Amino acid sequence: VASFRVFAVEAPALPDGLKVYPLAVVDRVNQSDVADYRLVTGSVVKINRQVRTDEIRLSGKLNRIFWEIPRSDEPQAAFNYFRDQLVEKGAQILFECDGRTCGASNIWANDLFQNAALYGRDDTQFYLAAELNGNHYAAYAVRRGNQRVYFHLDLMLGDKESDQAWNLPLEAQGYTKLPFWPQSPELAAQSLAEWMSEHPGKVRIVVHQAGQDVELSARKAERLVAALIERVVDQGIDKERLEGFGLGPLVPSLLGSNQQVAVVIWVR
């Protein structure tokens, strides 16, 4: 069970130089260590009391911040103010939606953000999931039926120290899990390309993909590893130095609770 420290007045400074809507007033801030955070990357629906959506599972430090916006302003203004900064700084927008295409507002409020105050009109909501410099953002804006306007942000801080040291077991034992995968294929490819530019030899990438159907999962893993190799090649690495394999769910001990795992093997 996560333990929360609650602040009533001041929100922590956001990383990456990001700012919140100038007229926003912080209402509350929760900070916690989270072992299994759901970063939603698709529209939401509830079936048999279970929320169904596309998602990325993360762990780390969660900053959950909640602001109130002047009622005279539209939720889209606060949302776009934040979104535009992410785009300008080169963030990867993993998913975004607005209005009824997001799903029911009560699911976002009560099931995903655990904040009933975010339960608003479905046609006034805006959401995005993004990744920037190893940090993950989930931003949500909505107008309630009483006309109050709110902006909510979940910030999952990346574990930069462990990511920076990802190559140590690769060099010591010849294999390791690829960092940032599958949350950010771009950062995963960049990390591997940077390492390969300084180390000779070939690399085998093995993608493991969970799934009940072994053949379908293996084919998906093969597509994923092919796309990953192309990203590494785009970073300037010779394609002849890369081999890719998709094993689907055939090594459950590696997958654990993860849907996807990419393992890098150094062929010296």
Image: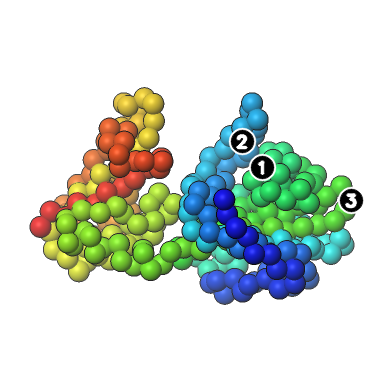
For label 1, the SS is: helix
* Up/down of 112 relative to 196, above or below: above
Q: Which residue in the rendered view is the most extreme toward the left?
A: 268
10 Å neighbourhood of mark 1: few (<14), some, or many (≥20)?
Answer: some
Q: What's the residue at 87%, 47% (across, down)?
A: 145
For label 3, the SS is: loop
Q: Is residue 38 left or right of residue 240?
A: right
Mark 2 and mark 3 residues within 8 Å of each other at the beta carbon: no
* Quarter of the figure that contains the C terminus: bottom left
Q: What's the residue at 87%, 62% (across, down)?
A: 72
Mark 1 and mark 3 residues within 8 Å of each other at the beta carbon: no
Q: Is residue 122 visible?
A: yes
Give percent across and percent down for residue 170: 21, 59
Q: What label sits on residue 111 in the rendered view?
A: 1
- Name the foreground residue: 239 vs 247: 247
Q: What label sits on residue 146 in the rendered view?
A: 3
Question: Which callout, 2 or 3, points at the residue further toward the start of the chain?
Answer: 2
Q: CA distance from mark 2 to mark 3?
A: 26 Å
* Up/down of 50 relative to 198, above or below: above
Inspect the image, locate mark 1, and give the three-letter code of the amino acid beneath it. Answer: Asp
Mark 2 and mark 1 residues within 8 Å of each other at the beta carbon: yes
Q: Which residue is mark 2?
A: 51
Inspect the image, locate mark 3, and give the three-letter code of the amino acid beneath it. Answer: Asn
Question: Which callout, 2 or 1, points at the residue further toward the start of the chain?
Answer: 2
Q: Nearer the viewer, mark 1 or mark 3?
A: 1
Give percent across and percent down for residue 144: 83, 50
10 Å neighbourhood of mark 3: few (<14), some, or many (≥20)?
Answer: few
Q: Nearer the viewer, mark 2 or mark 3?
A: 2
Give percent across and percent down for residue 13: 61, 74
Q: What's the residue at 34%, 41% (across, down)?
A: 255
